[in-house]
Amino acid sequence: MSGITGSNPYRASGVIAAAAAGGLSWQSVVTGSTLTAVAGNAYWIDTTSNTCTITLPASASNGDELIFADFDRTWGTYKIIIDSNGLNYQGFDDTYDVEYGTDGTAVDIVYSDATNGWIPILDEAVAETPSKGNDNGLFAFGQSSAPPPYYNVSNKVSNVGVIATDTSGVGTARGEGVAGCEYGGDKGIIGFGYTGSRTAVTNLVTNAGVVGTDVTGVGTARQNLSACDYGGDKGIFAYGNDGSADNTSNLVSNTGVVATDVTGVGTARSHLASCEYGGDKGIFGFGGGTMSMTNLISNTGVVGTDVSGVGSGREGLGACSYGGDKGIFSNTATNYTNLVSNTGVVATDVAGVGTAKGATAGTQYGFDKGIFAYGSIPGPAVTAISNLISNTGVQAADVSGVGQTRKYHASCSYN
């Protein structure tokens, strides 16, 4: 890959400066575990799969310069290690470890002299723009513990995770696994579910969190499915029950239009959950009573084959994204959570915090945090209790419920 940039190309805003004659030459993306750097070059370092050890030149002259940049914002998972190869680094000899392990970091180093050696003139994380995720969330629809009634109320979630009181319902009241996701980057869509019979009707959600009137359904009417977004601005509904377990999917365009059925991939099941990961991909997981397998969704909306399950098999759980590029599955009667890495790998069970609840749902808020709310608790009964998820994936204690107690509701985010 060709390209020349001037010295110190990263401005405070994270914008690359215009090219300058005699500047650095950007190299092809480095994905390996080692790199021998050459002065005068700039390198994209992709640590999606492994740590990268970078060996600096064995000799250098005053003004020699190198840049290393986090290509896929993964240095927080797999760091880079710089071997100064006999020369000093900020005045320290090469017996000291030099490591960078923060997502989005750019490191620009210039050689000074034998005493101070290589000196970073920039070594900080570059802000991610646009931010991944939305600032506000929404819970909508749902049902009582023994329906009817079904509900069409909604509750907004602020950018600090506070749930608002009920907003009067719009659209056909329904529950039993109605699903929701984002589209267009800042809007949402809620669809399918059960009204007394299965339906495929959808309702668009504006970027102000207003639920629209019914849109005639497209695709197989079904209940207890799930939905997530992919590609940064599109969505997908998948799996569920149309009289028996189903694995059909329906893509949602970046204008909120639902496409016809796509032939199913993976084990047919219902009562599962889904969320985003990696910024532009999705994952469906668990469901079907005691299943724990997952199915990854590519950034073009293609459903992958089954991935062997990790964690306790269960159904009726919820999922949401956090941290900008990771996800979490949470709750049911077992009260476990399972984190999802930014490469779609599901972690083992983490003991739950707060009241165990099933038939719950989760959404993001504040761009990089999440919230789970509503659902069923032993009794049986329905609840409005919520639990916040930090931007590091930690589930907090119960927050007193606000709004109509219910379960099998939908959620999405908006901005």
Image (cartoon, rainbow, N blue to C red):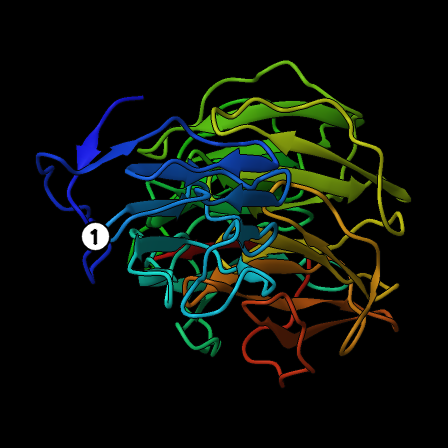
For the point 31% across and 36% down, the residue is 41
Does residue 225 show up? no
Residue under pointer 1 = 8
Label count reads: 1
7 with respect to 120 (left or right): left
Image coordinates of residue 145 in percent, x first then y, are: 76, 64
Does residue 287 show up? yes
Image coordinates of residue 90 in percent, x first then y, are: 40, 68
Image coordinates of residue 130 in percent, x first then y, are: 30, 51
47 with respect to 344 (left or right): left
For the point 49% across and 60% down, the residue is 102
312 with respect to 47 (left or right): right
Q: Amino acid at mark 1?
A: Asn
In the foreground, 72 or 378:
72
For the point 39% across and 64% down, the residue is 136
117 with respect to 196 (left or right): left
Extreme residue toward the top, this view: 263
Q: Residues within 10 Å of mark 1 (few under 14, many from 20)?
A: some
For the point 61% across and 49% down, the residue is 78
In the foreground, 228 or 68:
68
Image coordinates of residue 175 in percent, x first then y, are: 63, 51
In the foreground, 297 or 129:
129
In the foreground, 224 or 308:
308
**Secondary element type, mark 1:** loop
Quadrant including the N terminus:
top left
Is 88 drawn above or below residue 55 in the view shown? below
Quadrant including the C terminus:
bottom left
